[in-house]
Image (cartoon, grey):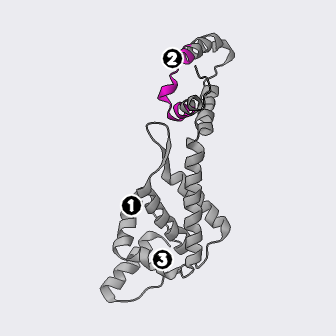
Amino acid sequence: MKFNELKEMVQKNKETGENFTLEVKRYLPFVMKTMFINDMVVSCIYENEKNMKVIDFSQKKLCFDIYILRDYAGIEFDQDEVIEQYDYLKQNGIINYVYDIIDNKNDLDELTIMVNDTLQQEIQTNNSFEGVLSKGIQDLISKIPESGKIDKWMKSTVKAIKDFDPSKHEKLNELLNYAKSEGTKVE
């Protein structure tokens, strides 16, 4: 059901007191849960100014509710007006109504746990030493020029290596400090 159709039903209910029915799934199939989770990862995780992955918690709440409405109640939102439409549904009790109708709380609990675990895993993987190193290597590989520009690239790479300061990289700095504390000679 398109958002505008639902809005008309809500307005009619306010004006006439006429009840409306919103069909809500009791269970979301596993494949749909997987797509829900993937949408949450794409929508809620961003890279901050330190190139670290972080979760936008307000976006997480908004998206979780929007995707619940989309996947359990079949509500289609206008992408240009999602926030305004969300606010309208929140103010008119529709979001709580949908959560109340989903009588399979175990399904919602399971979905919530899966979303939280996946978001946390994504953050930990991307912000680990290995993840940061992998991003750096991928960056370096993407900068390898065509065969005619190799000399210029080699000179700039040597300069970048000479200018490299490990103290500016938090995870690398932690690793070096740990190695020093264990008695490993680090130069």
Q: Which residue is mark 1?
A: 83
**Lower position in the chain sequence, tag 2 or tag 1:** 1
Q: Can residue 143 be seen?
A: yes
Q: Secondary structure at mark 1?
A: helix
**Lower position in the chain sequence, tag 3 or tag 1:** 1
Residues at marks 2 and 1, CA–CA distance in whole angstroms = 45 Å
Dot 3, how many residues are within 10 Å of its Cα: few (below 14), some (14-19), or many (20+)?
Answer: some
Q: Which residue is mark 2?
A: 163
Residues at marks 3 and 1, CA–CA distance in whole angstroms = 19 Å
| Closer-to-camera residue (171/13) | 171
Image coords of residue 183 (percent x, y): 60, 28
Image coords of residue 81 (percent x, y): 39, 60
Residue type of the residue flagged with mark 3: Tyr
Hey, which quadrant is residue 80 in on the image? bottom left
Outermost residue toward the right?
147
Residue type of the residue flagged with mark 1: Ile
Q: How many marks?
A: 3
Q: Secondary structure at mark 2?
A: loop
| Closer-to-camera residue (24/54) | 54
Q: Which mark is residue 99?
A: 3
Decide: is 101 above or below 28. Answer: below
Q: Can residue 78 be seen?
A: no
In contact (CB < 8 Å): disc 3 and disc 1: no
Dot 1, how many residues are within 10 Å of its Cα: few (below 14), some (14-19), or many (20+)?
Answer: some
Magenta span of residues: 159-175
Residue ID at (59%, 74%): 107
Image coords of residue 85 (percent x, y): 39, 66
